[in-house]
Image (tube, rainbow, N blue to C red):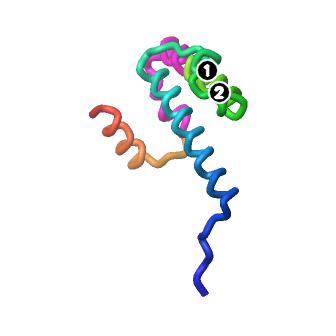
Amino acid sequence: MKPNFELTPEEDLDMIERAEEIDAFGEFTDMLVAGENPDVETFLLRYPELADALREDLEFAKWFYEDVQRFKRAHPEVDMLDVLCPDLDEEMKKKIRSMRNR
């Protein structure tokens, strides 16, 4: 028997809204990585229909990114990959580090 992957109209709308949230979140984090300092509330003015769903996630992302940056400045000798992903095997860490250096 084949599984039924058809979505109801409500499920389809939920998927579209979630994709919009993911896109907006990605845009915000791209701004952080690019060295910008986006204000959460100002950013959310561009996405008023997503503001309630995104606000807490964006605030956390900004706090976390800034905290990681402070840690990196205080401890430049520490590889954040070892801190954030201590259980990764060395082969995977090597692959990730090579992608970072491109």
Q: Amino acid at mark 2?
A: Pro
Task: Name which quarter of the figure residue 57 lies in.
Answer: top right
Q: Secondary structure at mark 2?
A: helix
Q: Residues within 10 Å of mark 1 (few under 14, many from 20)?
A: few
Which residue occupies the extreme left position in the image? 102
Please give the residue where the numbered disc 2 appears in the rendered image. 48
Task: Name which quarter of the figure residue 67 lies in.
Answer: top right
Q: Secondary structure at mark 1?
A: loop
Q: Which mark is residue 102?
A: none
Q: Amino acid at mark 1?
A: Leu
**Where's residue 38, x and y in %?**
54, 16
Q: Which residues are magenta?
A: 68-85
| CB-based contact (under 8 Å), mark 2 and mark 1 | yes
Q: Residues within 10 Å of mark 2 (few under 14, many from 20)?
A: few
Q: Is residue 18 magenta?
A: no
Q: How many marks?
A: 2
The residue at the point 67 percent across, 28 percent down is: 51
**Where's residue 47, x and y in %?**
60, 28
Please give the residue where the numbered disc 1 appears in the rendered image. 45
Q: Is residue 79 magenta?
A: yes
Quarter of the image that includes the N terminus? bottom right
Residue 67 vs 94, above or below: the answer is above
The residue at the point 66 percent across, 23 percent down is: 59
**Where's residue 88, x and y in %?**
50, 46
